Amino acid sequence: MIDVRHVTKRFGIGAPAVTALGDVSLVIPEGSFFTLLGPSGCGKTTLLRLIAGFELPSEGEIALDGDPIGHLAPHERPVNTVFQNYALFPHMSVARNIGFGLEMLKRPKSEISTTIEEMLDLVQLGAFASRRVDQLSGGQQQRVALARALAPRPKVLLLDEPLSALDLKLRKGMQSELKRLQHETGITFVFVTHDQGEALAMSDQIAVMSAGAVRQVGTPEQIYTKPQSRFVADFIGDTNIVKADLLGYEGDRALIHFGEGETLAVHAASLSLQPGPVHVAMRPETISILDEGAETALLRGSVIDSTYFGAGSQMRLRLDDGTEVIAQVEHPRAPGSRVGLRCDSAMLHVLED
Amino acid sequence: MRDALQTQSKLRSAQATRAARKRRARLLLLLPALLVIGLFGLAPLSIALVYSFLEPGTYGGVEWVFSPDAYVQFLYERDIFDDTLVFNSAYLQIFGRSFGLAVITMIGTLIVGFPVAYFIAARPPEQRNFWLFAITLPFWTNLLIRTYSMLLIVRDEGFINLMLIKAGLISKPLEMLYTDGAVLAGLVYSYLPFMILPIYASLEKFDFSLLEAGHDLYATRFNVFRHIVIPLTRPGIVAGCALVLIPALGAYITPELLGGGKKLMIGNLIALQFGAGRNWPFGSAAALILMALVLIALLVSLRAGASKEGGND
């Protein structure tokens, strides 16, 4: 288990110091596939480098299984990293790359060679042991980097956007490969990415970050269906964010009204929001399109266009207040036509700003 | 059919003329270099080779009589009275001393130069040119003048002694000029850029994320240096060592000025033979022996460099 406690990281000295991380606290459970997700510059890579030991925290502490490690050098931590550019040693064979960590730990030769064999099998590169790393394809280099980082059996494996250099097909393959490796080894994986699809597909838990802070931590399902804030809802996917009026609360439900139709009792990210204008997340697949005059309509607007994608069509609509929304429907309406919209209230979700 | 054949043969001859023209152009472009090398490199070498097998003239120059004496003289002394050969290690000692000094110079420039090259390579790209400029700045002044100014610094009434006496650390000046130490310092100073530049060239391409990868995989700073930095910059180190060792072996000005010519170095020995010594054949022979030794050393080091690369080690 990694316990990140009130960690702040500033770069530069004096007045123009840049705060990359501001008072971040986070618990990464043992043996989980944990993803740090956020746009570039959000501090996710800085957090990873702090855990690896390449940077030291300006404030706060990082503990691994209860022992503080925040100020140890990288070679003193049972933590290994898979680098974005792989950083394989070009003057060593595949086998020696994989064995390097154990060699530095002064493990007996026999143990090193057995582990190298195991690792080569694990990443399915058995035939490549004596190859030079520059003779390998991108995907193969990726797997050597994984094997090299896993060989010393670290308590935590850090992965810094390891799939970003691969093409789409390889990336999909490596996603399930990584999942499998995490499962088989039981090692805690901390995975950094800016690709929400990747994060949702692979993670046990996701921490969504922006501007040096953690916005939300949860399972992929929680993050996807119950985003806490507008930022998370916006970042995680194609969720529509629609304006509504918050009237009050009924138990743990928020009462909202869209200006037309009935008042709805919906889930809310927080029960401490002030009544007044709020933003509501509305997933495209939960929207149904009605005729303009339909009495049950909650919102009205006009169709901009629609795109057929096989399983259905994706329609873009402009609501009367100017907001653009996307709806997934089976039968799209013609562009320019006026329609009413309705949404399953169980799938609506009031966001924090 | 005939037309086709004709065009084909035309095409072939056109190709042939083009290839010939290309060859001619290549030769023409190489001509200046070939002329310089031939006229000022190979020709003097051939002259030296021929002269080394002739007899010395009484007032310099050579007598056109074949004689291997120059090479014999390198190892043996001819008794004036009974013409017997006696082994004489004096010249071997000069060679040995020169080699020793050149090797120590090489090690010195490596120890001083590597961190400098590393420092420059680790600067942001826009700053590197400034540092490289600073490294090459001494070349703007003649070596002779730079060596004279060193002489002014290390001599008995020089800057260092003056400072030390003023500071009360010593009462009478340290004898630094005309010592091996002064020659060594002068050589290290003169040849330092030849070590820094090739090492910098190989460090510039070095991927510094490999250092982090090494640290991450439990290597201490020393081990990262030994297992990652050194092997990946070996070509630059080998080139730098060769570029320092070879000219240091034949160094003339520095040992002459800073060493006072008290102990002969190869360069001084050769110069002496063509001057006061009036033994041109022996000077030529010494120069050729030096060249042969350098070539052998270079081949051995290249072999060593090649076998280390690409292996599993």
Image (cartoon, rainbow, N blue to C red):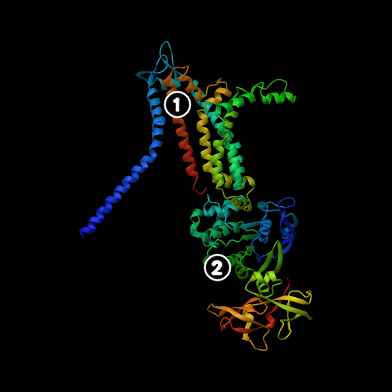
From this view, report whether residue A190 is shown above or below residue B174. Answer: below
Residue ranking furthest to the left: B2
Tag on residue B1? none
Residue A36, x across and y down, in percent? 66, 64
Image-based side of A104 in relation to A22, left or right: left
Number of marks present in the image shown: 2
Same chain for marks 2 and 1?
A: no
Residue ranking furthest to the top: B81
- Cα–Cα span, label 2 and label 1: 67 Å
Q: Nearer the viewer, residue B301 or A187?
A: B301
Query: What residue is disc 1 on?
Result: B287
Quadrant housing the N terminus of chain B: bottom left
Residue B92, x across and y down, in percent? 49, 24
Residue A196 appears in the rendering = yes
* Disc 1, SS: helix
Quadrant for residue B42, please give it: top left
User: Which kind of residue does numbered mark 1 sit on?
Assistant: Ala
Residue A104, x across and y down, in percent? 61, 50
User: Which kind of residue does numbered mark 2 sit on?
Assistant: Lys
Q: Tell me the residue at 62%/60% (across/down).
A: A160
* Disc 2, SS: helix
From this view, report whether residue A127 is shown above or below residue A219. Answer: above
From this view, report whether residue A284 is shown above or below residue B123. Answer: below
Residue A116, x across and y down, in percent? 55, 56
Q: Which of B216 and B238 is in front in this view?
A: B238
The residue marked by circle 1 belongs to what chain? B
The residue marked by circle 2 belongs to what chain? A
Residue B72 appears in the rendering = no
- The reply to whether discs 2 and 1 touch (Cβ–Cβ < 8 Å) is no
* Residue density around tag 1, few if under 14, some if 14–19, many if 20 or more, within 10 Å: many
Tag on residue A172? 2
* Residue density around tag 2, few if under 14, some if 14–19, many if 20 or more, within 10 Å: some
